[in-house]
Amino acid sequence: MPSLAESQARFIACLQKGPAHFPDDLFMQSADRALLGMKAHANTISHARLVALEDSYPKLHTHMGHETFHAVSRDYIEQDHILACDLNRIAADFAVFLSDRGHDSSTVDLARIEWAWLESYRSAEAAPLLLADIAALAEDKLLAFPIAAHPALRLVAITGRLSPELSGLADSDPGAPMPGALLIVRPEAQILFHPLTGVEQAIAEKISESATMGNLLEHALELGDETTAMQHLVKLIQAGALMHIEG
């Protein structure tokens, strides 16, 4: 008699890989009845995976259209490593899959943005650094002030035109350049998007490497003069991208 672990593995293999892996000696019912039940169960799981993808990417679903989105989704969930995923992580690699399949940059960017939104939503709670927290500090204290990236911070580089589903983020001037990246933050209960220029993106990318405000300011000064560097840091602080590390 196979062990419990072996029986579970055979059961899962049948659900994932089809009737050819059906475990004949696992059920007391006839093989036909047991296989019928497993087919129903497998269909339920497959449907749940498709729903999980659609729930993770509502804007992408609209952007691509229902039929295209679901056709791509069905191909995606049939991959072996996706079959082994739980529903909470099943959508994590969808943007990579779309890119590998040759979808345009607008579509891929939107998928990456929506997944980053979910990651920000699920991230740990933390109080964001406020300008009021550092406004009264002397210069030496300000430069030594310990910081870190807020746990809800996500940064997504923009590689093409923004999807119409994100039209609210585009500049009102149609001739204005697209943002270099989107900063996704959750300073309070609401998740917010902040378009960044290329310079602002480069500074934001250095937050995780900066132990103090002085470190981050040094990175900012490498990309501009003192006035613009401070303006960029103020924008990041006001967005809720930083947090204070208690000593």
Image: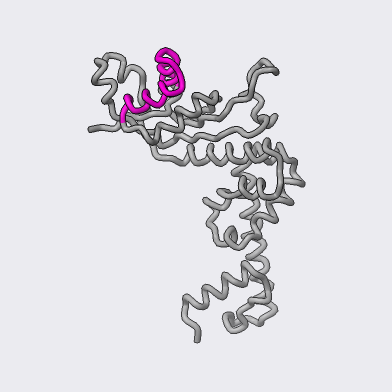
| Nearest the eye: 11 or 17 | 17
Q: Quadrant of residue 48?
A: bottom right
Q: Quadrant of the C terminus?
A: top left
Of helix, strand and loop, which mostly describes the magenta segment?
helix
Q: Is residue 8 above or below residue 201?
A: below
Q: Is residue 61 above or below residue 180?
A: below
Q: Is residue 230 left or right of residue 136?
A: right
Q: Is residue 211 left or right of residue 120?
A: left
Q: Quadrant of residue 163?
A: top right
| Nearest the eye: 169 or 34 | 169
Going 70% across and 49% down the picture, which residue do you hit? 101
In the rendered image, residue 167, in percent from the top left (x then y), is placed at 66, 25
Going 71% across and 50% down the picture, which residue do you hit? 72
In the rendered image, residue 202, in percent from the top left (x then y), is placed at 48, 29
In the rendered image, residue 131, in percent from the top left (x then y), is placed at 36, 18
In the rendered image, residue 240, in percent from the top left (x then y), is placed at 42, 26
Residue lying furthest bottom in this view? Answer: 1
Q: Is residue 43 above or below residue 127?
A: below
**Span colored in magenta:** 212-235
Q: Is residue 121 magenta?
A: no
